[in-house]
Image (cartoon, rainbow, N blue to C red):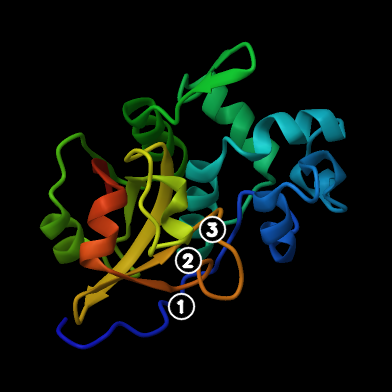
């Protein structure tokens, strides 16, 4: 498309239960364990929620894809448990390896019938050409993409759902974006996105 992309119509999910408190989680003024809606994640304790909440950007993207296609959207910890069973996440002490693309693709294909093409080398032009509300792209960017005017310290490490392109912009849902500008249908200039983008992702068919 050549014109600036409008609203995607894809439902939005943050990686935190209290979407409207994202700014406070990001700036550290509110601990994740103090998210007033932590129990909605399905976590057994606030500490378990805190452990996972900053690690599930990819599963938030999956929730958006499920909702967009009219499928039921399980609680986040239900998805975490399934991801662990498929080794899409591998806990390593305080850290977690993942989201690991191929096990994730195998899992959502087997259990949801969603075709995910793993693309370890995915040029930005291919993202722009492929992304739509019906065929979104899960792209690896630095988490500072919520502030497109900043210079990120690295590329990659965070996943966003790209749902369209046009007019020199990419349209995306960012699981760790802050309201109002960088959560839902955020429009990021392609040139800015490139500074955050790791050149890899997954195409949802």
Q: State how far apart marks 1 and 3 are (Cα).
A: 15 Å
Given residues 9 and 106, the one toward you in this image is 9
**Residue 73, image x, y percentages:** 61, 53
Q: Residue at x 57, y 29 (%)?
A: 82
Tag 1 residue: 9
Callout 1 crowding tier (Cα within 10 Å): few <14, some 14–19, many ≥20: few
Q: State how far apart marks 1 and 2 are (Cα).
A: 8 Å
Q: State how far apart marks 3 and 2 are (Cα).
A: 8 Å
Where is residue 2, by image quadrant? bottom left
Q: Which mark is residue 71?
A: 3
Q: Residue at x 44, y 31 (%)?
A: 99
Tag 2 residue: 68
Q: From this viewpoint, which residue is outermost toward the bottom?
A: 3
Q: Residue at x 45, y 51 (%)?
A: 144
Left or right, residue 31 beside residue 132: right
Q: Is residue 168 above or below residue 74?
A: below
Q: Is residue 6 above or below residue 164?
A: below
**Residue 183, image x, y percentages:** 53, 66
Residue 204 visible here: no
The secondary structure type at the circle numbered 1 is: loop
Given residues 81 and 57, the one toward you in this image is 57
The secondary structure type at the circle numbered 2 is: helix
**Residue 52, image x, y percentages:** 66, 32
Q: Is residue 92 above or below residue 154?
A: above
Residue 199 visible here: yes
- Total numbered badges shown on the rendered structure: 3
Q: Are the two marked residues, 3 and 2, in contact with CB atoms closer than 8 angstroms?
A: no
């Amino acid at each position: 498309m050549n014109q600036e992309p409008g609203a995607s119509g894809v439902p939005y999910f943050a990686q935190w239960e209290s979407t409207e408190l994202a700014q406070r989680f990001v700036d550290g003024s509110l601990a994740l364990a103090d998210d007033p809606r932590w129990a909605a994640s399905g976590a057994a304790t606030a500490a378990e929620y805190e452990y996972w909440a900053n690690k599930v950007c990819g599963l938030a993207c999956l929730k958006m894809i499920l909702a967009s296609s009219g499928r039921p959207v399980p609680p986040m910890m239900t998805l975490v448990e399934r991801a662990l069973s498929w080794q899409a996440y591998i806990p390593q002490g305080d850290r977690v390896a993942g989201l690991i693309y191929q096990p994730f693709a195998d899992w959502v294909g087997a259990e949801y019938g969603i075709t995910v093409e793993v693309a370890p080398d995915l040029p930005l032009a291919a993202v722009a050409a492929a992304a739509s509300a019906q065929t979104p792209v899960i792209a690896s960017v630095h988490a500072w993409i919520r502030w497109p005017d900043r210079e990120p310290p690295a590329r990659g490490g965070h996943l966003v759902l790209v749902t369209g392109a046009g007019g020199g912009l990419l349209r995306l849902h960012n699981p760790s974006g802050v309201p109002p500008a960088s959560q839902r249908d955020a429009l990021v200039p392609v040139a800015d996105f490139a500074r955050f983008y790791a050149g890899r992702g997954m195409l949802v068919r």
